[in-house]
Amino acid sequence: MFARMLVPQSAARKIQAMILSGELAAGQQIPSQRDLSQSLGISRASLREALLTLETLGMLVTQPGRGTFVSEGPPSGPRAMAPWRYGDSYPVADVFETRLLLEGAISEHSASTLTASDFDMLGQIADDMEHSWSAGDLLSNVESDLEFHALIVSRCRNRMLVDLYRSVQTLVTETQRQPIPMTAPARMSESIAEHRLILGALKARDGVAARRRMEEHISNTALCAGVVLKKR
């Protein structure tokens, strides 16, 4: 999946750079998909995936019958949330609930297997999340978020839990992008702090606390997407 996403992600980065530099101004209609795919040297399919990613992050908005436009307002400010892409398969609430169950259990298992270098890496990733958000680099912010969770998953000693997580990873990834437009700066600060609390529990080798901290974080993230998860 990573190789397949490499070209769309690179294209998304180039378009985001155009937005952040002002080359594509707020409210401006972006070039047609034909022109944009030619200028970026990519296929229309890869471009569509890149545009969907940026739309999910709230940087672009598609107006039926008119085209795709750069969203109004600062990149890190609250905006309208894009429609859930996978509604034909599962409601977004079901995916968040599945994340809660899987990642909570995975965090508990990983507390005993993560290494000192893993802890250093997780701390650096949390710092990267904070810096990229401040710079308006939403793509890097989400990529760091994904990397943080993926590292914890990779150290889980229950390989079946890992396989279950990876079987739904595309949907999980979308729930980490979906709330971004509704995430105010104060909430992002809280989210980064939650990542550091998860890290603190893992470093203490406290699996029960790691599970609880991860579940709290996922529940709070779900709230940004308008999903209220039942407390366990």
Image (cartoon, rainbow, N blue to C red):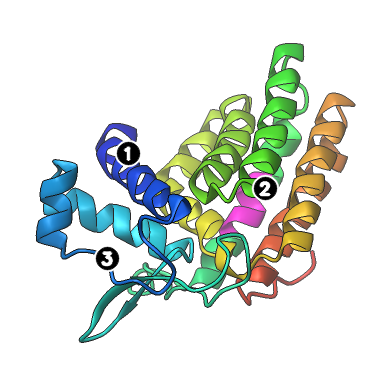
Q: Residue 30 has which mark? A: 3
Residue span colored magenta: 98-103
> Where residue 176 sits: x, y (%)?
55, 54
Number of marks in the image? 3
10 Å crowding of disc 2: few (<14), some (14-19), many (20+): some
Residue furthest to the bottom in view is 65
> Where residue 43 sits: x, y (%)?
12, 47
> Where residue 204 sits: x, y (%)?
90, 26
Residue 118 in which image quadrant: top right
Quadrant (top left, top right, bottom left, bottom right) of the N terminus: top left
Q: Which amino acid does label 3 sit on?
A: Ile
Q: Which residue is the site of mark 2?
A: 134
N-terminal label among 2 and 1: 1
Q: Is mark 2 on a helix, strand or loop?
A: helix
Is 103 placed left or right of 38 in the picture? right
Residue 113 seen in the current view:
no
Residue depicted at x 78% and y 53%: 189
Residue depicted at x 16% and y 65%: 32
Is 49 above or below relative to 132? Answer: below
Question: Do tag 3 and tag 2 residues touch (Cβ < 8 Å)?
Answer: no
Q: Which residue is the site of mark 1?
A: 10
Between residue 192 and residue 137, name the one nearer to us: 137
> Where residue 169 sits: x, y (%)?
45, 46
Is 170 placed left or right of 97 in the picture? left
Q: Is mark 3 on a helix, strand or loop?
A: loop
Q: Residue 169 has which mark? A: none
